[in-house]
Image: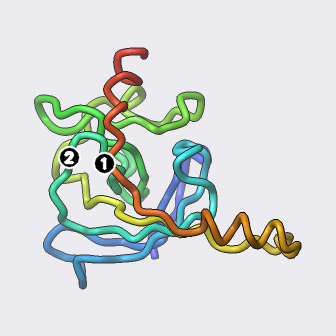
Amino acid sequence: MEERTGEVPEMPELSQEGERGRAVAPWGLAEVTGPSMVPTLQHGDRLLVRYGAAVRHGDIVVLRHPFQQDLLVVKRAVERREGGWWVLGDNPYAGGDSTDYGVVPDELVLGTARFRYRPLRPGQRSPLALARWAVSAARPLLPDRSASRRLRAR
């Protein structure tokens, strides 16, 4: 578990630690908190993360916050720049991305999220709610090739 001091509540964090070269397994599970990746990821979503995986344009990545390295965050790798990756959240109103802290060095990018699972919420008991959940609960996370348009729009 990570030490949680001075967190920025709008930024998603992950419940699993892992670093390149130190991860017990190349795959791990994580839980998302916060709204910065809405609509792609919701608060409470679970992620299957491939630690040490090569990052491509549009991938959803797990990284250490550049200014608070005990905090893990989830963002979209939008553009490769000198010194690392420019990352953005899918929710432009949440903040907490490269527009705030600049390029993220490669050594802080831990891996890529490959699969999202949305757990059943306690109030989802009706047959219609269960059917909606069953259809949308598990999805692969594919690279978003439209990420460069969001970057140009900012």
Q: Quadrant of residue 136?
A: bottom right
Relative vertical location of residue 145 with respect to residue 52 in this rendering, above or below: above
Asked whether, in this view, residue 148 is left or right of residue 82, the answer is: right
Q: Is residue 101 visible?
A: yes
Position in image of residue 72 (x %, y %):
41, 57
Q: Residue drawn at (26%, 60%), measured in percent from left and top?
A: 110
Q: Quadrant of residue 86?
A: top left
Colour mode of the rendering: rainbow
Asked whether, in this view, residue 107 is left or right of residue 9, the answer is: left
Relative vertical location of residue 148 with respect to residue 3 in this rendering, above or below: above
What is the residue that sits farthest to the bottom in this orientation?
24
Relative vertical location of residue 88 with respect to residue 40 in this rendering, above or below: above
Q: Residue drawn at (46%, 76%), measured in percent from left and top?
A: 1
What is the residue that sits farthest to the top in this orientation?
153
Q: Residue drawn at (36%, 41%), measured in percent from left and top?
A: 144
The amino acid type found where label 1 is placed reads Asp
Q: Mark number for residue 56? A: 2
**Category of crowding for the residue at label 1, using alpha-carbon neighbours closer than 10 angstroms: few (below 14), some (14–19), many (at least 20):** many
Q: Mark number for residue 85? A: none
Under circle 2, the secondary element is: loop
The amino acid type found where label 2 is placed reads Arg
- The residue under label 1 is 59
Position in image of residue 34 (x %, y %):
60, 51
Position in image of residue 32 (x %, y %):
54, 61
Q: Which residue is more in the foreground, 80 or 13?
A: 80
Under circle 1, the secondary element is: loop
Q: Is residue 3 visible?
A: no
